[in-house]
Image (cartoon, rainbow, N blue to C red):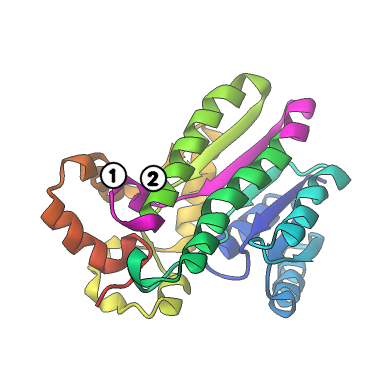
């Protein structure tokens, strides 16, 4: 049976991916910091879907712990990698300790780069495999370091998709907007300020993303409304971008 590795699988988009992959028949390697919660999720997924779930508790911003996860790709075939671990901050860049900004940079950029590299090398040798890097529609809006990091994820993934297509390896960036997850609660965001039509369901999002991956898309943007938002973002005046970013699409809450 094929195996998939998912980072940040205990809730939200990561949990939806774990459930989707289990329904598709994949055994799972689940990676997050909270070992007790990971074990709970692994037990539940195994009971619901009848697949094996391996738990890897790791703080991916710690180089030594990240290296343990990287080595897992050499221990046995991983057919699908989902880079989903998230990081958000309430304050603007200049109000955060630079060490905190570095942690966000590490998790959203460095970890994605290293795990993707660890994953695609054996995939290229086998001539098969897939990587999904969870980005954000915020990456199309020039606002804050979160948006900058997500822009990197989208461009990195799209470029790699072109390079690896002929080798049988699929790479896709998933760029959602507002999704009903724990992310915004942890940010202390008032979700009522966002129009209801902008909110997405994580399970529906992942189902559509999986279809896009199977179609060979390099970038998956859910729903026509977010496709229009991402296409028009480059033409939006700065004043509107500033107002838009206060809603939290750039991973921060401003008050």
Asked whether residue 243 is drawn in magenta, I would say: no
Label 1 to label 2, Cα distance in Å? Answer: 8 Å
In magenta, the rendered stretch is 121-146
Give the residue drawn at x 43%, y 50%. 150
**Residue 159 place in picture, x, y as percent:** 50, 29
Q: Whole-percent x and y of residue 9?
A: 63, 64
Q: Quadrant of residue 59?
A: bottom right
Question: Mark 1 = which residue?
Answer: 230
Q: Nearer the viewer, residue 94 or 75?
A: 94
* Residue 221 visible from this viewpoint: yes
Q: Quadrant of residue 113?
A: top right
Q: Are marks 1 and 2 in contact (CB under 8 Å)?
A: yes
Q: Is residue 47 above or below residue 109?
A: below
Element carrying mark 2: loop
Q: Is residue 153 above or below residue 32?
A: above
- Give the class, few, some or many, for how many residues have Cα within 10 Å of label 2's Cα (few <14, many ≥20): many
Q: Position of residue 240 (x, y in %)?
A: 14, 56
Q: Residue at x 53, y 49 (%)?
A: 109
């Amino acid at each position: 049976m094929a195996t998939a590795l998912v980072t940040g699988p205990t809730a939200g988009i990561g949990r939806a991916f774990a459930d989707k992959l289990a329904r598709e028949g994949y055994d799972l390697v689940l990676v997050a910091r909270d070992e007790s919660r990971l074990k709970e999720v692994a037990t539940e997924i195994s009971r619901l879907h009848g697949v094996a779930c391996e738990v890897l508790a790791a703080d991916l911003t710690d180089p030594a712990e990240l290296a343990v996860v990287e080595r897992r790709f050499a221990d046995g075939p991983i057919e699908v990698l989902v880079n989903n671990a998230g990081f958000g901050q309430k304050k603007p860049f200049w109000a955060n300790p630079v060490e905190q900004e570095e942690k966000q940079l590490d998790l959203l950029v460095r970890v994605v780069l290293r795990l993707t590299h660890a994953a695609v090398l054996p995939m290229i040798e086998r001539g098969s495999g897939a990587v999904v890097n969870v980005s954000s529609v915020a990456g199309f809006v020039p606002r804050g370091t979160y948006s900058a990091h997500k822009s990197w994820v989208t461009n990195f993934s799209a470029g790699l998709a072109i390079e690896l297509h002929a080798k049988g390896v699929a790479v896709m960036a998933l760029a959602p907007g507002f999704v009903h997850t724990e992310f915004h609660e942890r940010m202390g965001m008032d979700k009522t300020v966002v129009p209801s039509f902008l909110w997405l369901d994580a399970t529906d999002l992942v189902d559509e993303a999986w279809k896009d991956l199977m179609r060979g898309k390099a970038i998956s943007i859910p729903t026509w409304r977010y496709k229009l938002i991402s296409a028009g973002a480059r033409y939006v005046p700065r004043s509107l971008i500033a107002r838009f970013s206060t809603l939290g699409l750039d991973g921060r809450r401003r008050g």
